[in-house]
């Protein structure tokens, strides 16, 4: 309904990410492993683990099992595959998130999105399709005890007397 100012800031005053975007947990500054700043243009494929913040321009593809933070002035034209995507900027292309997508005002999305969890703040503009995929839960294989079956494992059978 009403917007709340809950932005976390780095020591240099750069806004990192609002609290509550990753399941109620703020994203500390030391978890952002790379930063593409305002005025920086990148063209190509980015593959990484961890969290990356983009405030510049990117044209290409992004692959990560971690997080992607798209700043309010970012312009991304890319196919995005990530664990968590938090977007305040402009994305043209498909977004596939394994865990969640969070869209914050003034985000503009032009493309398809696939995610099990979607959060959209008032003021966001979306053009495209949305597929709400079920959450994939990885279940550890369990150990099963095997019992041999054969002539020696059968109980003796009593024959009826005539």
Image (spheres, helix red, strand yellow):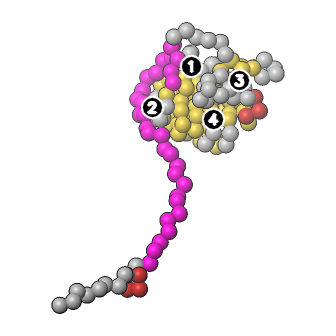
Element at label 4: strand
Residue 112 has which mark?
2
Q: Position of residue 95 (x, y in %)?
A: 51, 34
Element at label 2: loop
Q: Is residue 17 visible?
A: yes
Q: Determine the residue located farthest toward the front in the rendered image.
A: 162
Q: Is residue 75 visible?
A: no
Residue at which label 1 appears: 104
Vertical comparison of 61 with 69: above or below: below
Q: Residues within 10 Å of mark 4 (few under 14, many from 20)?
A: many
Q: Determine the residue located farthest toward the bottom in the rendered image.
A: 162
Residue at which label 4 appears: 67
Residue 16 has which mark?
3
Taking the spot 75% from the left edge, 29% from the top edge, the residue there is 29
Q: Quadrant of residue 13 in the image?
A: top right
State which mark lies toward you, 2 or 1: 1
């Amino acid at each position: 309904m009403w917007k709340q100012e809950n932005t976390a800031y780095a020591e240099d005053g750069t806004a990192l990410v609002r609290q509550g975007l990753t399941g109620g947990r703020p994203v500390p500054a030391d978890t952002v492993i790379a930063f593409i700043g305002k005025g920086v243009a990148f063209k190509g494929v980015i593959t990484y683990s961890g969290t990356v913040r983009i405030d510049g321009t990117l044209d290409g593809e992004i692959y990560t099992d971690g997080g992607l933070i798209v700043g309010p002035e970012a312009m991304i034209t890319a196919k995005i595959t990530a664990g968590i995507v938090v977007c305040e900027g402009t994305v043209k292309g498909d977004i596939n998130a394994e865990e969640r997508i969070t869209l914050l005002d003034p985000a503009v999305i032009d493309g398809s999105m696939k995610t099990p969890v979607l959060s959209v703040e008032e003021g966001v503009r979306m053009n495209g399709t949305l597929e709400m995929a079920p959450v994939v839960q990885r279940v550890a294989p369990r150990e099963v005890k095997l019992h041999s079956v054969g002539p020696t494992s059968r109980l003796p059978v009593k024959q009826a007397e005539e």
